[in-house]
Image (cartoon, rainbow, N blue to C red):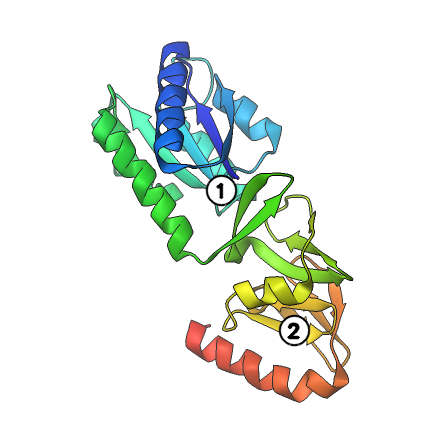
Amino acid sequence: MVRIAVCDDSEFMRSETKKRILNYSVKKDLDYSLDEYDVGEKLVNSGEKYDLIFMDYEFENKGANGLDIAKKIREYDKNSTIVFASSYPSIVFDTFEVGTFRFLTKPIDIDKFNDVMDAFVKTLEEDSVLKIRLDGENHFFKESTISYVEGMGKNCILHFCDGREKMECRETLGAIEARLSSKKFYRCYKSYLINLAQVDSYNHEEVTMSTGEKLLISRLKYKEFNNIYADYLVKAGV
């Protein structure tokens, strides 16, 4: 499921954006959840992390402008896709410094809005997204947000590096491993599948992830892991 936030001080604009997202989701069969905020500080204080954020620029003295809010969001969430919507196209270049995905000028053209949604969905597909079916709903996770996957018998637990809560799914670790990129993930132990990009350090006994968690590494796999990780760093240009 794609998590979306709409942050705009105009109730009309929030309503219009929600309608367009709904219409798009019906046509494209997109599962999503949506939260709305009338001021940027409420979005930041929520501490929630979203896949896609539609952000107003000017909140008319109701709080900080959208650019300042986006900077605060980037302090705790570098992965969210931010789309600015504003009546002031002159600020478009200022929004680049917070990694803005797209910029929409109000009033928002429906075709341009759909183009933005198409581009966003394409990034999900290109960024090697893991799809999990749970309780009748599809959940989508970018590989870059997964720290490691822990095997628990017939189930497994997804652990994330972006602060979100871990998630248990009814699939084996082997089934998940088969759908993740073999160039980015490595089974360092029988019950741990780690994201190489999230490795902070390691020794002969354990791997320390960027989150600070320490995971066992099989002694029989240490030499192989050492070579694979070194090769990963070279190809990643680290």
Identify whether 8 is placed above or below 158.
above
Q: Position of residue 191 (x, y in %)?
A: 74, 68
Q: Which mark is residue 97?
A: none
Find disc 2 in the rendering and name its residue.
187
Q: Amino acid at mark 1?
A: Arg
Depth order, front residue of 95/25? 25
Depth order, front residue of 140/67? 140
Depth order, front residue of 92/28? 28
Q: Position of residue 125 (x, y in %)?
A: 40, 53
Q: Residues within 10 Å of mark 2 (few under 14, many from 20)?
A: many
- The kind of secondary structure element at disc 2 is strand
In the drawing, does residue 201 fall left or right of residue 58?
right
Q: Position of residue 196 (x, y in %)?
A: 57, 69
- The kind of secondary structure element at disc 1 is helix
Residue drawn at 60 percent across, 38 percent down: 136
Q: Which mark is residue 74?
A: 1
In the drawing, does residue 114 fall left or right of residue 193?
left
Figure quadrant of residue 98? top left
